Amino acid sequence: MRRVLLYAAVGISLYYLGSSLIFRLQLNDMRRIDFRYAQFREALAADRYAEAYTFMSPGYRQSRSMEDFEDAFSGLDLHPLYPTRLLSIRFGTATLLPEHDRYGPIFQSSMVLEWEEIDGEWYLTGEIHQALD
């Protein structure tokens, strides 16, 4: 019986240690995405489309010209990051809801921005849509 309890205690400890390590690794990615989103938002708000275009993934830039980007993103009203923003990171992709307010009304609309990590840097994929919680 003691051996079972010992194994259970070791297993639980390893689980918490692994979870903590994964969280710390994701925290670094979360900070990088938050920072890049703020830079992207600032560039769009100032109509610096050439600068904002650099935040798009290489695949997006290969398939769409600067003019296509400007047509698609001009007038886009990006909100600042709410403290309760929702950011989900999985296997080199991320989903960001910058204006998500988990303490707000039951149903709310929020912009969803998709990201991908390429060579250690996070880029917007160009997939932006509205979500209703």
Image: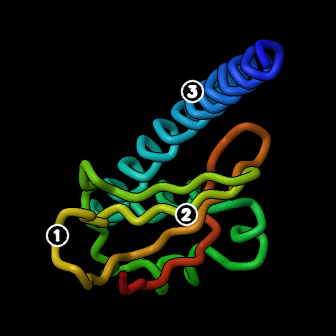
Q: CA distance from mark 2 to mark 3?
A: 18 Å
Q: Residue at x 62, y 26 (%)?
A: 16
For label 1, the SS is loop
For label 3, the SS is helix
Q: Quadrant of residue 77?
A: bottom left
Of callouts 2 and 3, which one flags the residue occurring earlier in the amino acid sequence? 3
- Which residue, given by chain and number where applicable, does mark 2 sit on? 95
Q: Quadrant of residue 42?
A: bottom left
Of callouts 3 and 1, which one flags the residue occurring earlier in the amino acid sequence? 3
The x, y position of residue 63, in whole percent, is 76, 78
Please tell me which residue lies in front, 124 or 2. Answer: 2
The amino acid at mark 3 is Arg
The amino acid at mark 1 is Gly
- Which residue, given by chain and number where applicable, does mark 1 sit on? 104
Relative to 114, 119 lies left or right: right
Q: Quadrant of residue 54?
A: bottom right
Marks 2,3: beta carbons within 8 A: no
The amino acid at mark 2 is Thr
Q: Which mark is residue 24?
A: 3
Relative to 79, 98 lies left or right: right
- Number of the front mark, 2 or 3: 3
Q: Residue at x 42, y 41 (%)?
A: 35
Please tell me which residue lies in front, 63 or 131. Answer: 131
